Image: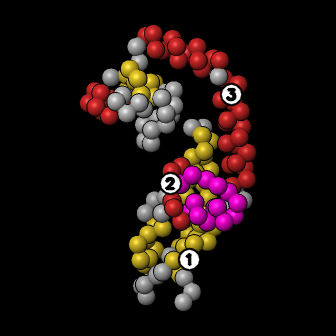
Amino acid sequence: MEIILKEDVVNLGYKNDIVTVKSGYGRNYLIPTGKAVIASPAAKKMLAEELKQRAHKLEKIKKDAEAVAESLKEVSLTIATKVSATGTIFGSVSNIQIAEELAKLGHNIDRKIIFVKGVKEVGSYTATVKLHKEVSVEIPFEVVAEAE
């Protein structure tokens, strides 16, 4: 089933993308929650016209995302957390801690666009921040033991 997304859906697509999903997912979740509409020929024509009219606005949004990405390129984070004697972390470091550290540095980034793979030990890692569908930046961070 082809649908047009009305907002960004994680692991599926971005606003105004035409994507193919299984019928149950589209009919039972995406369409009733207002996240998508059926991609009929009329809806596709309306989408094309809307995108043509909004092209300059979308370009500005992309330039803003690139500016934020440029400011984040020099950022390197250090996250202190409780660690066991063997060097493993109690819990894990998630996108919430990354967002909090970025906020301390003056970068207000939504935690939902920060992606971190399972960090369970002390060491150096990278987090990916997807600012736009074409703009993403990797932020290096180091996990260290919290001083007692």
* Within-10-Å neighbours for mark 2: few <14, some 14–19, many 20+: some
Q: Quadrant of residue 85?
A: bottom left
Q: Secondary structure at mark 3?
A: helix
Residue neighbourhood size for the residue with mark 3, other residues' Cα within 10 Å, grouped as few (<14), some (14–19), many (≥20)? few
Mark 3 vs mark 1, foreground winner is: 3
> Which label sits on residue 58?
none
Residue 114 visible in the current orientation: no
Q: For this view, does 21 lie left or right of residue 79?
A: left
Q: Are marks 2 and 1 in contact (CB under 8 Å)?
A: no
Question: Does 11 sit above or below residue 88?
Answer: above
Residue 130 image offset from top left, x and y in percent: 57, 46
Indicate the amino acid at tag 2: Phe
Q: Secondary structure at mark 1?
A: strand
Are the residues at dot 3 and dot 2 in contact (C-beta closer than 8 Å)? no
Mark 3 or 2 closer to N-term?
A: 3
User: In the image, is residue 99 part of the stretch drawn in magenta?
Assistant: yes
Magenta-colored span:
98-111
- Give the SS element for disc 2: strand
Q: Which residue is mark 3?
A: 57
Name the amino acid type tagged 3. Answer: Lys
Residue type for callout 1: Ala
Which label lies toward us, 3 or 2? 3
Q: Out of 83 and 27, give the one closest to the viewer.
A: 27
Residue where numbered disc 2 is placed: 115
Q: As drawn, is 62 to the left or to the right of 89?
A: right
Point 58% across, 64% down: residue: 100
So how many labels did they put on this image? 3
